Image (tube, rainbow, N blue to C red):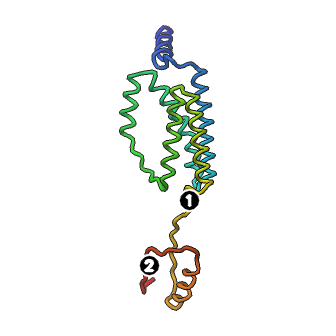
Amino acid sequence: MNKIAHAIKDQFGTELVKNLSMSRIVLSLVIAFGLGLFIFFIYRVTYSGVLYHRTFAFSLVMLSMITAVVIMTISSNLALSLGMVGALSIVRFRTAVKDVNDTVFMFWAITAGIMTGTGYYFISSLSTLTLGLLYYLLVFFGFKSQKSLYLLVIRYDKSAANKINGLIHTLPRNKVKSKTASSGG
């Protein structure tokens, strides 16, 4: 029985993680965590939408780390990488991305995790810091549109129509895209 347990331990220790040492795993996770925190910080500082979701911002950190672990695992075993591709092809992401920049930040976090997981620590750090600095400067100097779209629903009595229309026209740079009026409210 002891021989079987030892053989299983040896098999898992050598076959699944041939080229991975504990120091490389820890270093990759620490760097992916740091890069994910930097991406999170840039996202939080430059976010200009209506509703800021902390859970999405925190998931950027986890996304970097998870991707690094997956890439380390995939790169060390061909059979496991084929199984992972099959598993990922089954998964469907149903969360609707509300802002294009959210997609950009997700790809950025995934890319940082991929580069870290493959062991390109310098390239991942340099490119993440450079991209973050450039994105921050673009937002700071106004290259990113700060205009946010809002949906305003006003329910009012017909007797207040003139007052409501007067108030709408006093707002700066307002644009009414659609107006629906009904007698039933």
Residue 173: give its label. Answer: none
Three-letter code, disc 2: Lys
User: Which residue sits at x=48%, y=42%?
Assistant: 107
Residue 75 figure quarter: top left
Q: Amino acid at mark 1?
A: Gly
The image quadrant that residue 39 belongs to is: top right
Residue 140 image position (x, y, % from top left) = 63, 54
Q: Is residue 104 above or below residue 179?
A: above
Residue assigned mark 1: 49
**Residue 86, percent from left and from top:** 36, 33
Q: Mark 2 — residue?
A: 179
At a point 51% along the width and 9% down the height, the residue shown is: 2
Counting from the top left corner in percent of width and height, residue 149 is at: 51, 66
CA gap, disc 2 to disc 1?
24 Å
- 89 or 41: which is nearer to us? 41
Residue at x-position 36% and y-position 39% = 90
Say which quadrant the C terminus sits in: bottom left
Residue placed most toward the observer, 48 or 151: 48
Q: Which residue is farthest bottom?
A: 159
Question: Cβ–Cβ below 8 Å for labels 2 and 1?
Answer: no
On the picture, is 100 further left or further right than 130? Answer: left
